[in-house]
Image (tube, rainbow, N blue to C red):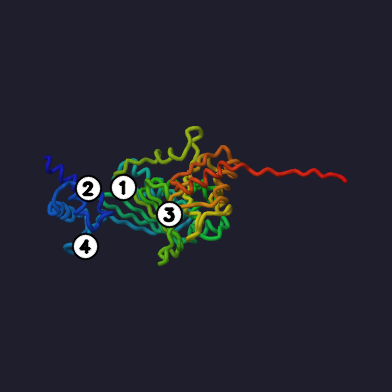
Amino acid sequence: MRIRARGEDVRCFILEHVEKSPKDIAKKAADHFTITRQAVNKHLQRLVKEGSLKEDGKTRKRTYKLAPVSEWRKTYDITPELEEHILWEKDIAPVLGELPENVMDIWHYGFTEMLNNAKDHSGGTQLIVQISKTAVNTIMWIVDNGVGIFKKIQQALSLPDPRYAVLELSKGKLTTDPSRHTGEGIFFSSRMFDSFGIGAGEVFFGHAFGKDEDWILSNDDSTFAMGTTVSMRVSNHTARTVKKIFDQYTSEEDFGFNKTVVPIDLARYGSDKLISRSQAKRVLARLELFRVVVLDFAEVPSIGQAFADEIFRVFANEHPAISLIPIHTSSEVKRMIERAKSTIPATSIGFTQVNP
């Protein structure tokens, strides 16, 4: 019984880590359990035979990856009759199959929110839903043929570049149709899944669970040239719940969405340095909608005096009820923040006119 249980532990370890280590998973498993590579290879071959893993290449060049247990794809016309709750009950839930209730809740929220966004905002005529399920996790893609989410946000907010749309999207409470949407769907979906991504045009927005930072990537091969592609992935056995994610960003008093995390690095364009008040105002846009604002300075080595002053003195003084919490600050960033907080506003000097 002990040997059999240990074998199950080894195979579970392989399935959980093979995506990050497709080339050296045998070595990692051998080191972790203090067993030989030959012993690990027996477990790898068993998983291949069972259909849980796929192998490519031979001998030292052999790699492993999770084999899809099921794959499904369907195209839908975007019409007023396309109802996300009906698609969920009729198609999506049956395809996802037997998953824990908390995992199905995450999928229900993410799918219905993203499909609703595509229906109401994309301006497209068709969308594709694709689902790939392995023994470890499930990934879903929702692709529409509309105008592209970042271009639409750029136009709605008169932004100079679609990349700046990512900064606004990461804050939450952003919608181009406030009468019908709260702007919370993408923000909360990006926090619920193990990984969440949106690609459109030459811009990609992504977030990984457990990391405060969001990131932006240029897409040179124009994979997302048409419409918007949303990808969502989560473990089939995660203990995460929808409620836990909502609780992180809502208050107990009014249950409102009042906390956000702003990745400051997204305010930069290329190799720009964050030095000006205009850059700071880009960061501060719409932050008056929140009570708690976490300013994440990861990947930001320094900031200018004017940038820091606009956020930590001017904005802070104008909005005393809003808590500004800087995190991941370098020593240089921390120094500029403290300097801005301690600055005494200049007072105007009055002159009395003396009559001759």
Q: Secondary structure at mark 4?
A: strand
Res 56 label: 4
Res 215 label: 3
Q: Are marks 1 and 4 in contact (CB under 8 Å)?
A: no
**Disc with the residue nearer the chain's start (4 vs 3):** 4
**Disc with the residue nearer the chain's start (1 vs 4):** 4
Mark 1 or 3, which is nearer the eye? Answer: 3
Say whether residue 122 is left or right of residue 192: right
Q: Secondary structure at mark 3?
A: strand
Q: Is residue 344 above or below residue 91?
A: above
Q: Are marks 2 and 1 in contact (CB under 8 Å)?
A: no
Look at label 2 and name its amino acid.
Phe
Q: Residue at x 49, y 53 (%)?
A: 167
The outermost residue toward the right is 356
Look at label 1 and name its amino acid.
Ser
Look at label 3 and name its amino acid.
Trp
The outermost residue toward the bottom is 221
Q: Quadrant of the N terminus?
A: top left
Mark 2 or 1, which is nearer the eye? Answer: 2
**Disc with the residue nearer the chain's start (2 vs 1):** 2
Look at label 4 and name its amino acid.
Asp
Which residue lies under the disc numbered 2? Answer: 13
